[in-house]
Amino acid sequence: DSGVTQTPKHLITATGQRVTLRCSPRSGDLSVYWYQQSLDQGLQFLIQYYNGEERAKGNILERFSAQQFPDLHSELNLSSLELGDSALYFCASSVGDRGYTEAFFGQGTRLTVV
Amino acid sequence: LAKTTQPISMDSYEGQEVNITCSHNNIATNDYITWYQQFPSQGPRFIIQGYKTKVTNEVASLFIPADRKSSTLSLPRVSLSDTAVYYCLVGDGVTGGGNKLTFGTGTQLKVEL
């Protein structure tokens, strides 16, 4: 158990809908990262927050947004869903915001868009 | 952004030592080298991290030459349970720049009996 909690574990929804994925980081970790992993694309970095502020941005679509709340949990909002958004979405957390801090990953949310 | 290059796949047998090399020619002075392991449908798991020379922990060793343009993850005496994808990452140690923790394509290690 990494200490990072993601909910829900599975999500099935229809095209055009909006969903929210939730992540609770390990106690004491200030950074939260979001990743998308689909079969044909590997692990794609989406966005990083550090202590409530956006710190780094990757290949995140405009239909996707995220935020980190004062209690440090984070939510990833996916809207106008398309079939291609079906993937495993991982959240990770770390103490710091640099490359030398170990990141701990949650078990992921499997999103299926039908 | 320091890019990494790894072999796409490797095969081994139980009990053998496996060495996976990663190339990172444009590594920055402040960057650390980190390796993660991922099993199917699970989140990646930290294995080991280093800056230079050699680092060893209970599961692996990491060898980094003086120029730091490559690194080698060494797994001693692998077992079937070591079958996984192994990722080499180079940290974006840019002041104030955040940490994109960019994963490459990784190396699929398959261990057989």
Image (cartoon, rainbow, N blue to C red):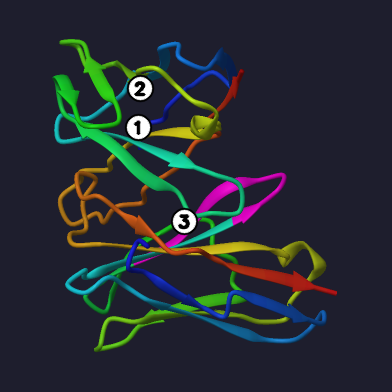
Which residue is at 21% across, 69% downward?
A: A29
Q: Is mark 1 on a helix, strand or loop?
A: loop
Name the foreground residue: B110 vs A6.
B110
Q: Do labels 1 and 2 share a chain?
A: yes
Q: In this view, does A43 lie above or below B15?
A: below
**Tag 1 near tag 2, CB within 8 Å:** yes
Residue stretch in magenta: A37-48
Q: Which quarter shows the C terminus of chain A?
A: bottom right
The amino acid type found where label 2 is placed reads: His
The amino acid type found where label 1 is placed reads: Ala
Residue A28 placement (x, y as % from top left):
17, 72
Q: Mark 3 points at which residue?
A: A58
The amino acid type found where label 3 is placed reads: Gly
Q: Name the residue under label 2.
A: B24
Residue A7 placement (x, y as % from top left):
52, 80
Dot 1: chain letter: B
Callout 2: few (<14), some (14-19), or many (20+) C-alpha neighbours within 10 Å?
many
